[in-house]
Amino acid sequence: MNKIQEFNGLHSSKELLFLGNAWDLLSALTLEKAGFKAIGTTSWGIANSLGFSDGELIDFDRHLGIMKTIVENVKIPVSADIEAGYSEDTNKIIDNVLRTADVGAAGINIEDSLKKSNRLREISQHCNLLEKIRIALDHNGYKDFYINARTDTYFQRQNPFMETIERAKAYVESGASGIFVPGLKEPNEIKGITMNVNAPLNILSLPGLTNCNKLKELGVRRFSFGNALSDKVIAYLEKKAGELLEYKDTSLLYENEH
C-alpha cells in the first residue's frame, strides 16, 4: 500500500483521523514518535518558523523544500497545507500541486479564500480549479491523491451554514476527497454538514471544540489543531528566553530534572 492509499484509508477507518500538524522536521518527527498516524503541515506554523506571517508570503520553493524534508524523514503519510495554491494563475496552482505530489505528499489542503482580497472564490471558479487539479493528478500517476477542499465560509460570511453545504457538495462533485470547514463549531451545524455532504468532514480545533470522541459522534472523520501547537511552542520559547535574560540564571533550564 502506498502513502496515498494509506492516507485515504485513515479517513474511512473506524477511528476518527486525529491529524498532527507539523511546521518543521523536528515537530514532524516528534508527532510521529508520539504515535500520530498522519501529519498535516500548518502553513501558519511554517511561516512563523521562518519569520513570516501566514498568507503565502514565503516562496513556494522554500515551502516545498520543508515538505520534502518532512516526507523523506517520516514513515507516516503527510498532507501539505498549500493555502490557496500559492498563485492566482490556475496553471501555476496545478503545477504547485503536482510538485507537492512529486515530493511524496499524500494529499493537500487547498482553500477557496483569496490572498489579495478578503473574499472567497466564486463557486464555479473554484470547482473548475478542483476539476483541473484532479485531472492533472490522475494523468500524472497520482490517482486518489487526497484533496481536502477547505472552505472559509465560517470566516467570511455572517450566516454561512447553507452556503457551506452548497460549496462542499460542489467541491466533492468537482473532485475533492474531503471537506475542511475551519471555524465551524456548533454541534447541530457540524451534524447537518456531515449528514448532507457525502465526503469526510475535517474540523479545526478551537477553544471549546477539542474532543475527538464527541466529534466522531457528530460524524466528523478528521480533526486537526492547525497552528495551536506551534503557537504554544513559540510562546514557551519566548517566555523561557525572556526569563533567562531577566534572571541572568540558567537554573530554570534544569527545573523538574531528576
Image (cartoon, helix red, strand yellow):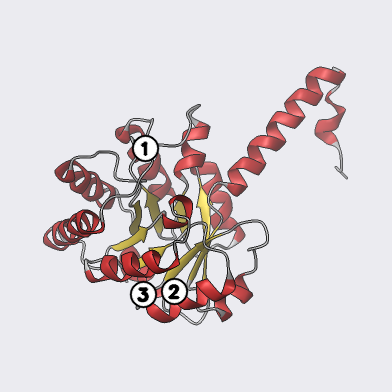
Tell me residue 241's x, y (percent): 73, 25
The mark lying in front, picked from 3 and 1, is 3
Question: Which residue is denoted by mark 1 in the rendering?
Answer: 63
The residues bearing labels 2 and 3 have C-alpha atoms spaced at a distance of 10 Å
State which quadrant residue 11 falls in.
bottom left
Secondary structure beneath label 3: loop
Q: Quadrant of residue 246?
A: top right
* Residue in the picture at 83% in, 35% down: 254
Q: At 25% across and 49% down in the image, what residue appears? A: 97
Amino acid beneath label 1: His
Q: Amino acid at mark 3?
A: Ala
Q: Is residue 110 visible?
A: yes
Q: Earlier in the sequence, mark 2 or mark 1?
A: 1
Q: Is residue 42 above or below residue 131?
A: above
Which is more N-terminal, label 3 or label 2?
2
Q: Secondary structure at mark 2?
A: helix
The quadrant of the picture occupied by the C terminus is top right
Query: Which is more toward the observer, 101 or 158?
Result: 158
**Observer-nearest of 228 and 118:** 118
Q: Tell me the amino acid under the disc marked 2.
A: Ile
The location of residue 170, given as percent across then percent down, is 26, 68
- Within 10 Å of disc 2 (Cα), the crowding (few <14, some 14-19, many 20+) is many
Mark 2 in CB contact with mark 1 (< 8 angstroms): no
In the picture, the quarter occupied by the N terminus is bottom left
Tag 1 secondary structure = helix
Q: Residues within 10 Å of mark 3 (few under 14, many from 20)?
A: many
User: Residue at the front extreme?
Assistant: 158
Reading the image, the residue beneath label 3 is: 199
Quarter assignment of residue 56: top left
Q: Position of residue 53 (x, y in %)?
A: 48, 31
Q: Residue 193 shows which numbered tag? A: 2
N-terminal of the pair, mark 3 or mark 1, is 1
